[in-house]
Image (cartoon, rainbow, N blue to C red):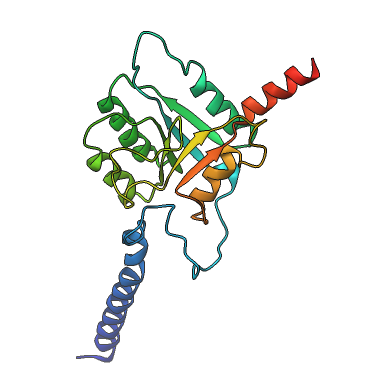
Amino acid sequence: MSRAGHVSTVFRRLAGLLLAVALLAGLPMLTGCAPKDRAVGDSWHAGTVPHDGVDRSDTLVALIGCPPTGDKDSDAGLDGRILASLKAERMKGYFSSAQSTGDQQDGVQDAVNRGVSLILIRQPGAGDWTPALKAARKAGIPVIEFAQSAKAWNPDPGRLYYAATVHPVDPAGHPHAPLLADALQTIVDDGPHARIMAVRLSADREGAEDEHRQ
């Protein structure tokens, strides 16, 4: 083999070795979206290494609406108040309406396809949520239940699939409860948080302040 041919062979082998190393180095990045044995956004522990979180203005929340439960909607306007509260705290969000549990689950899959930062589900309907929540977990997207009271998701799909339950409280009676946007940002950044959290809506706080000024 000529000297030029030998150099070419060595170069090709070296290039192949570097490519293999690069692929192996990138493998954890491709498969490490979901933490082991805990839900995305709920894996913080005492030994967690501090890191920079996502900028709030870059955070996109998918709000999945709840199916109607009767002739009268006691929560009329709540979806709008949630989105207004996020916007007031520089967080983007969009609403996905639902007439059934299936619609809610389709909304989760659409959110996964959009690559959102977090999925917020209002009162998840009865049914098998495992496939939809597995898709969000695989994509590394935290899922939060928005409930009306301090009760965890029932039936509980497990700590692998959703990070927390949040429920709204009266800002006047709970001045120290975190704002919804703050609680969601903590989960997006995988910071320490309770499994069930009372939250204040910025829209409710502003409305109360307007009434007080009048």
Which residue is located at x 51 percent, y 32 percent? Answer: 93
In this view, the residue farthest toward the right is 213
Give the vertical position of 182 relative to 43 (above or below): above
Give the vertical position of 159 relative to 170 (above or below): below
Where does residue 37 sit, x and y in percent of width and height?
31, 60
Give the vertical position of 122 relative to 179 (above or below): above
Where does residue 64 sit, x and y in percent of width and height?
40, 29
Where does residue 47 sit, x and y in percent of width and height?
49, 71
Q: Quadrant of residue 118?
A: top left
Where does residue 23 sit, x and y in percent of width and height?
31, 68
In this view, the residue farthest toward the front is 173
Q: Quadrant of residue 212?
A: top right
Quadrant where the N terminus is found in the figure: bottom left
Direction from residue 156 to residue 150 in the image, left or right:
right
Q: Nearer the viewer, residue 119 or 145?
A: 145
Which residue is located at x 53 percent, y 39 percent? Answer: 198
Give the vertical position of 197 relative to 209 (above or below): below
In this view, the residue farthest toward the top is 71
Q: Quadrant of residue 18?
A: bottom left
In this view, the residue farthest toward the left is 1
Quadrant where the C terminus is found in the figure: top right
Direction from residue 28 to residue 197 in the image, left or right:
right
Q: Nearer the viewer, residue 96 or 16?
A: 96
Which residue is located at x 61 percent, y 41 percent? Answer: 177
Count of numbered labels shown in the rendering: 0
Q: Nearer the viewer, residue 147 or 183?
A: 147
